[in-house]
Amino acid sequence: MTDRNDRWGELLRRANGGDAVAYAEFLTEVAPAIRTIVRGRSGDDSGNEDIVQEVLLAIHAKRHTWRETDPVTPWLYAIARYKTADAFRRLRRGPVQVPIGEHADRLVDEGQGDPTAARDLTRLLGKIDDRSASIVRAVGLEGESAGEVGTRMGMSEGAVRVAYHRAMTRLRHLAAADHEKDEM
Amino acid sequence: MKTEDLIATLAADPAPANGPSLEQRAVTGVAMGAAVSIAVFAAFYGPRPELGDALSDLVSLAKTLLPLFLGAMAGLLALRAARPGASFGMAQRLVWIVPAAVAALLVWAFATTPAAQRLPLFVGHSIHVCLPSILLLSLPILGGLIRALRQGAPVQPARCGALAGLGAAGLATALYSLFCVEDSPLFYGVWYSLGILLVTALGAYLGQRKLRW
């Protein structure tokens, strides 16, 4: 535990100084710990990896909230627990369950990605910024590769992937918020 | 997307963006909010007559100093609450000085006030000014603080928002106390506290809505 804390703290300090190798090592080493936290909450393995990735993105987006003088593991686990709890809360409210029989004719067109398949996706896309929305359309609906979209929009492939992932997270949040409203 | 790919993508951008720290943002946010509150105070309230005399009396001074101290401590705690896993440190103990002092002042005032005057002093004549004013003067500060805290990552957003509300209300109440002429703890110990609690509740509500990430 302390060993981990020291090692991860050292890696993250180097990452803060701009060391990409140390940062990759840090993320690679914390991923299994995050996976354990997610699995502890879900009890099984299905769909966990999406949540692990959400936690990794959250760590990335909020890495400025760690102070180099603080222990890193409490920070890390607090983020992982928060994001995991958040994800499961959303899943519980989850997509509305309807008997399949009534809607069998409408199932044909629906893809696998959850928010992309939502019937009101167009409306949800209207709520996020145009750039993110067009990335989701291109990658999620039209099946373009991140590289192609990147070339077209003047972004690196990696930037497109991160933007896509973030946009999907926001769409899931929006969909969950909508659902919450419906319940009230 | 595979997790290794995501990690490779994120690792391409190792250092967080250089910018003001959470603390600096909070100080800026509070300062801007406080400037608005002070402007409102100057325009519509103004200091009470003989403010200097009043502040030289310990019991009247307490109605300014206690909320000021509460504001500083709660603001500090709100910042800690915006950093995942951070400990609350000394501030979490020191903040209890305020309710303890208020309780002591209330007991003292109750004991030393003649029975016939207790009720009039407790009810006072400005509850209808006091409560809305504390709320009004808190709002700009609370807004500035919440805005700054959005850059943080509170794992209990409602708690972080409540602490921000407590902090903003403390500062706003200290400001309002310079206008208020009700100097008995039977009045301010109760009604200031109520106003502060209302803003704290508002902060919790705002935190739940605005500080989730």
Image: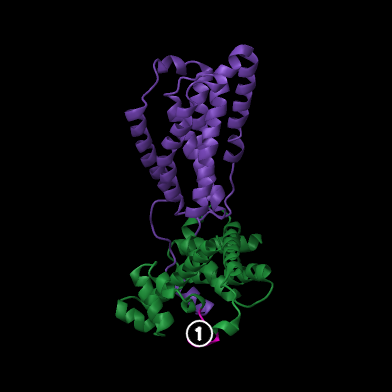
Chain colours: A green, B purple
Task: Give SS at disc 1.
Answer: helix
Residue A15's x, y, as percent? 47, 64
Q: Nearer the viewer, residue B29 or B94?
A: B29
- Give the magenta range: A104-113
Tell me if mark 1 has few (under 14), some (14-19) or many (20+) residues whose alpha carbon lies within 10 angstroms of its own.
few
Task: Point out residue A99 in the picture as x, y percentages from the top left corner.
Answer: 61, 80
Look at the image and tell me whether residue B78 can be seen: no
Residue type, mark 1 in image:
Arg
Q: Is residue A125 left or right of residue B108?
A: left
Residue occupying the point 46% across, 61% down: A16
Q: Position of residue B204 (x, y in %)?
A: 53, 47
Residue under label 1, please give it.
Answer: A106
Task: Indicate the quadrant where residue B33 lies.
Answer: top left
Dividing the picture into quadrants, the one containing residue A121 is bottom left
> Does the segment drawn in magenta span residue B69?
no
Magenta part mainly helix, strand or loop?
A: loop
Query: In x, y percent, where is residue A9?
Result: 55, 60
